């Protein structure tokens, strides 16, 4: 298949929420309690909610910026590529990368949307959850409905409220939610607890996909503050197999066998080993542990029934796609994060898919995502209108750069390797703990 003939759906991108997103969406009595942007004496811009400071960290919005300019420094809106936070410009950046549709995770409410669960007055946070979702459905995904797969956040301090929000979202055409890997890290009962059955039941009834992103476990276990930040960055993805194993043998899967869990940004190369380990352990140990996946079912069967995964660059995983299950693999762009393959994503992706048949390429690049998330625009508009070539053909002059960063705020290049401890020190002045990752 030629690169221009690819059709691409990204199941993991991120929106940098615009500063005015809550305007007109919060009842007047709560308007002064809504999250807002403030600026400090150094020119740094931050979201503030109930006294909590939440910066847009530079690494979360690097599209168009050379990696020599990346860093932890808080990013101002005028230092980001506008496609990070302006929906029309995002669609243009999707056209540049040949991406037909995108599912976008939150940023300042944390990737799992858990900010309003672990912080803030419950009544006020409930208002903010609904306001956030209404903005996402109307002003973001709703502005270009064929180009986005909408996704909502939940009030995760109350399973009945969470289930009600799943239903409200579904009534508005949204059947995807984001939740954290380990909700007990946020002071709530673990996902295996029957406490959450109302939420899982609503998701199964409505066909809502449960998206679980890396870095949402309440913090990754890091050996020490002397661990290289680069090593830590690798470790974050290791929580995905931990979460998958945890859920595989849980009552969630047994009680709700039709639930779909999307593992976001964890890659796929680890899956064959995990499945082999699960198969061996289940066959040898289940007689005395009491685990039972159901008559004749193996861990591989359950994985392929209940889980989907995604990758950016994962050649080893693609080479082992038949051990994983091609029908469970999807693709992500991860715009505008530092792992992203924007703007030459199609060229990078096609090289990763070397050896795949055209049917496998279509399944991985868009077909599986369309099926799982109920996205029908390719079918309605016709495949030819949705290809990389078709999307790129409508572009005029293309600017791939991000705005310049003021020299006094730019990170230093050529420094000593950054440790995990360095990162904590740098973040201490703007974060007070408890956020995803």
Image: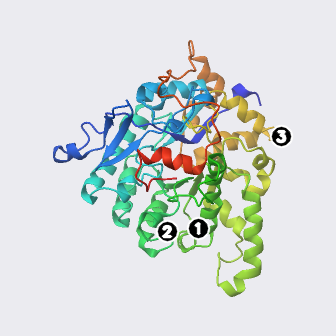
Q: Is residue 290 visible?
A: yes
Q: Is residue 98 visible?
A: no
Q: Are marks 3 and 1 in contact (CB under 8 Å)?
A: no
Residue sitting at the far right? 355
User: Is the residue under label 3 in contact with that under label 2 (CB below 8 Å)?
Assistant: no
- The residue wearing badge 1 is 247
Spatial CA span between label 3 and label 1: 32 Å
Q: Which mark is residue 158?
A: none
What residue lies at 40% left-to-right and 32% top-to-bottom? 143
Residue assigned mark 3: 355
Relative vertical location of residue 104 with respect to residue 326 in this rendering, above or below: above
Task: Say which residue label 2 marks.
Answer: 191
Q: Residue at x 75, y 70 (%)?
A: 279
Q: Picture quarter containing residue 240? A: bottom right
Report the front residue among 88 and 61. 61
Q: Earlier in the sequence, mark 2 or mark 3?
A: 2
Quarter of the view holding residue 42: top left
């Amino acid at each position: 298949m030629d690169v221009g003939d690819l059709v691409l759906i990204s199941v993991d991108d991120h929106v940098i929420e615009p500063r005015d997103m809550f305007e007109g969406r919060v009842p007047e009595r709560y308007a002064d309690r809504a999250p807002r942007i403030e600026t400090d004496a150094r020119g740094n811009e931050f979201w503030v909610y109930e006294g909590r400071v939440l910066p847009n960290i530079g690494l979360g919005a690097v599209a168009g910026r050379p990696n020599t300019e990346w860093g932890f420094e808080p990013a101002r809106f005028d230092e980001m590529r506008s496609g990070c936070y302006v929906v029309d410009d995002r669609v243009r950046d999707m056209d540049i990368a040949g991406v037909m549709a995108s599912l976008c995770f939150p940023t300042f409410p944390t990737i799992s949307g858990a900010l309003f669960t672990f912080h803030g007055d419950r009544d006020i946070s409930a208002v903010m959850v609904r306001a956030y979702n209404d903005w996402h459905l109307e002003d973001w995904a709703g502005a270009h409905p064929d180009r986005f797969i909408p996704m909502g956040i939940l009030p995760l301090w109350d399973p009945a409220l969470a289930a009600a929000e799943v239903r409200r979202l579904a009534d508005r055409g949204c059947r995807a939610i984001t939740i954290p890997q380990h909700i007990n890290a946020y002071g709530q009962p673990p996902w295996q607890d029957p406490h959450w059955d109302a939420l899982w039941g609503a998701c199964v009834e409505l066909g809502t996909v449960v998206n679980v992103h890396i870095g949402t476990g309440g913090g990754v276990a890091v050996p020490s503050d002397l661990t290289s930040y680069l090593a830590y960055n690798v470790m974050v993805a290791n929580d995905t197999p931990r979460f998958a194993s945890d859920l595989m043998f849980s009552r969630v899967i047994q009680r709700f066998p039709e639930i779909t869990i999307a593992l976001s940004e964890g890659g796929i190369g680890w899956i064959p080993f995990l499945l082999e380990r699960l198969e061996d352990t289940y066959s040898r140990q289940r007689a005395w542990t009491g685990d039972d996946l159901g008559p004749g079912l193996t861990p591989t069967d359950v994985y392929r029934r209940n889980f989907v995964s995604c990758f950016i660059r994962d050649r080893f995983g693609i080479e082992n796609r038949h051990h994983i299950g091609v029908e469970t693999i999807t693709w992500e762009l991860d715009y505008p994060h530092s792992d992203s393959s924007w703007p030459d994503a199609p060229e990078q992706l096609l090289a990763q898919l070397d050896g795949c048949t055209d049917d496998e390429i279509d399944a991985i690049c868009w077909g599986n995502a369309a099926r799982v998330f109920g996205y029908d625009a390719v079918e309605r508009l016709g495949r030819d209108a949705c290809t990389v070539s078709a999307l790129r053909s409508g572009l005029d002059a293309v600017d791939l750069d991000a705005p310049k960063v003021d020299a006094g705020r730019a990170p230093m290049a050529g420094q000593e390797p950054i440790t995990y401890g360095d990162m904590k020190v740098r973040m201490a002045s703007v974060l007070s703990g408890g956020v995803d990752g």
